Amino acid sequence: TIKNPSDLRNSSTELPLCPLIPADLKGPVPISDVAHSMEQLELLFDNVEPGGHYTPPNCRARSKVALVIPYRDRASQLTAFLYHMHPFLQKQQLEYGIIIVEQAGTGPFNRAMLMNIGFVEAQKLHKYDCFIFHDVDLLPEDDRNLYTCPEQPRHMSVAVSTLRYRLPYKDIFGGVSALTLEQFKTVNGFSNKFWGWGGEDDDMANRLKYHDYHISRYPANIARYKMLPHRRQPANPKRHEFLYNGNKRFTTDGLNNLHYNPKDLKLNKLYTWILVEISENR
Ligand code: UD2
Ligand code: MN
């Protein structure tokens, strides 16, 4: 039978699914040390929608990925990150959004809680199904390191420059890690109790193990990252104690007891910016 002309029109506007493995990946990608201002960057990437959201123009992305970045006072790292990541992710033909969650004030930093907040807030913006929690100072060095969520949670920053490009210990889950919406909900997100440096990533590894997930990884020659230089933050003296008895809190400490005071949210050109006030005493 002859097709109805309107069917034809429909089928030609429906984009094909993006390839499972993007076509023009190159392997190693250079990391620029040229500093850019935010204004310069905004002119460079005019294909990004407000809030740092991107949809591939020629195919339908297989998943929608939220990059959630815990952040405070690292302005030059943020511009280096955006300059590197937008082209990197676009080459992978992903639908993605970049969400910067900034902690207000000067109290101890709580990386894990900021990531929980990013997870919650991102879902109000787009139908994300994959969440990649990402230090702002880590830049991937190989474009075969796909920013997707596989069947098991993926630890992505396997080989980091400042750690001599070697996995420091088997269960490390810090740096960059990817979980599906379902996985993150199942483990009740991150603990909210880690104030200051350290422990929150290992607590997540314990949550994953407790729920019978295992940590998947790309080989070290692909999952390579450069860490931009920074000062060390003061370590949390309670991190070992909280890690040790963390399993008592998996079901009560995380997404289901997350409290924060949203102070601001802006759809900036290259990223969504969320400013939050958080506190220990609640
Ligand atoms: C390691 C982990 C990191 C986290 C941390 C302990 C790797 C490669 N990285 O990072 O994921 O587990 O230890 O908490 O394993 N940040 C700010 N402003 C601050 C402090 C932190 O924006 O004042 C953010 C930023 O995204 C930074 C991240 O938190 O990249 C981790 O903090 P870090 O870079 O100071 O800690 P580092 O490199 O020891
Ligand atoms: Mn760092």
Image (spheres, rainbow, N blue to C red):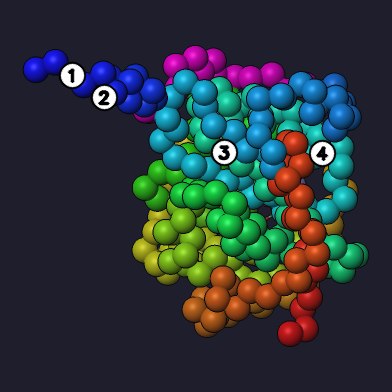
* Helix, strand or loop under label 3: strand
Per the rendering, the mark at residue 3 is 1
Nearer the observer: mark 2 or 3; the answer is 2
Q: Give the residue number, with chain letter if any, for mark 3.
A: 96
Up/down of 49 relative to 242, above or below: above
* Helix, strand or loop under label 2: helix
**Residue 207 seen by the camera:** yes
Q: What residue type is labelled 4?
A: Gln
Point 73% across, 75% down: residue: 238
* Gap in angstroms between the C-alphas marked 2 and 1: 7 Å
- The image quadrant that residue 143 belongs to is top right
Q: Where does the magenta region start and end?
A: 16-32
Q: Give the residue number, with chain letter if any, for mark 2.
A: 7
Q: Where is residue 96 in the image (x, y as percent from the top left)?
A: 57, 38
Q: Give the residue number, with chain letter if any, for mark 4.
A: 77
* Gap in angstroms between the C-alphas marked 1 and 4: 55 Å
Ligand 1 under 8 Å from disc 4 Cβ: yes
